[in-house]
Image: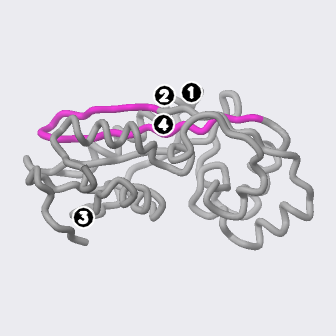
């Protein structure tokens, strides 16, 4: 995937296969020069805290992708945390149901860490938001699982999909909950000389 050269002369590489992150970048006028899915082990360490885990994932994704001098690599990781428990992407429908039942009627945190690598330096930010989920009935749960929207989403849900009807309240970054906090992302990109297309 290519785009028109930025005025800064830098190539932005998105180190993520998430279509949601690609859509969010488009909102701030960034079309990546290329998209690379980092191949890393995303298994949490034993007793690893959610924020520490999320930061580590964004950094390891960044380190896993080789870049050139003019490249600006953006990687990110989003984790749903209920207390100290880490909810990643469910492996199957049964696990998605387990995640959603655990979150039902409770508040939880959505942590998104971003890393921007340029000239062998990595700038990092972590954004934590709080999400309240209503009590989900069995009928609602089964209907949602049938949509398969839970696939590829931390915690088994996304605010931009049908699961939005389960979330009456959030506090924090809406775009961060989806997968890329735009204020912080734009600030980091500007810090390494990337111009937003609409500025």
- Left or right, 110 with respect to 8, comes to right
Q: Earlier in the sequence, mark 1 or mark 4?
A: 1
Q: Position of residue 89 (x, y in %)?
A: 59, 53
C-alpha distance separating marks 1 and 4: 9 Å
Residue annotated with mark 4 = 54
Quick check: marks 1 and 2 in contact, CB under 8 Å?
yes
Residue 153 or residue 60, whichever sits in front: 153
Instruction: Specify whether residue 115 is painted magenta.
Output: yes
- Left or right, 23 with respect to 78, comes to left
C-alpha distance separating marks 4 and 2: 6 Å
C-alpha distance separating marks 2 and 3: 28 Å
Between circles 2 and 3, the one closer to the viewer is 3
Q: Earlier in the sequence, mark 4 or mark 3?
A: 3
Residue annotated with mark 3 = 34
Quick check: marks 4 and 3 in contact, CB under 8 Å?
no
Quick check: marks 4 and 2 in contact, CB under 8 Å?
yes
Vertically, is 63 above or below 130? Answer: below
Specify the label residue 52 is tagged with.
2
Say which quarter of the image contains residue 34.
bottom left
Vertically, is 55 above or below 91? Answer: above
Q: Which residues are magenta?
A: 107-126
Residue annotated with mark 1 = 49
Query: Which secondary structure dominates the residues rendered in magenta?
Result: strand
Instruction: Name the residue at 82% across, 48% down.
Output: 101
């Amino acid at each position: 995937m290519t785009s028109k050269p930025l005025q800064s002369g830098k190539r932005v590489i998105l180190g993520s296969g998430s279509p949601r992150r690609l859509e969010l970048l488009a909102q701030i006028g960034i079309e990546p020069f290329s998209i690379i899915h980092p191949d890393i082990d995303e298994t949490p360490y034993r007793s690893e805290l959610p924020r520490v885990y999320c930061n580590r994932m964004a950094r390891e994704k960044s380190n896993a992708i080789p870049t050139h001098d003019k490249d600006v690599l953006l990687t990110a990781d989003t984790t749903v945390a209920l207390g100290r428990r880490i909810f990643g992407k469910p492996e199957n429908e049964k696990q998605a149901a387990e995640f959603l039942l655990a979150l039902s009627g409770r508040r939880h945190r959505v942590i998104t860490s971003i890393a921007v690598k340029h000239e062998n330096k990595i700038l990092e930010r972590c954004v934590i938001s709080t999400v309240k989920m209503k009590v989900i009935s069995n009928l609602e749960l089964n209907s949602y699982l049938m949509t398969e929207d839970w696939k590829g989403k931390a915690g088994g849900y996304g605010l931009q999909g049908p699961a939005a009807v389960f979330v009456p309240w959030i506090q924090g970054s809406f775009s961060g909950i989806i997968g890329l906090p735009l204020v912080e992302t734009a600030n980091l990109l500007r810090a390494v000389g990337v111009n937003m297309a609409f500025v």
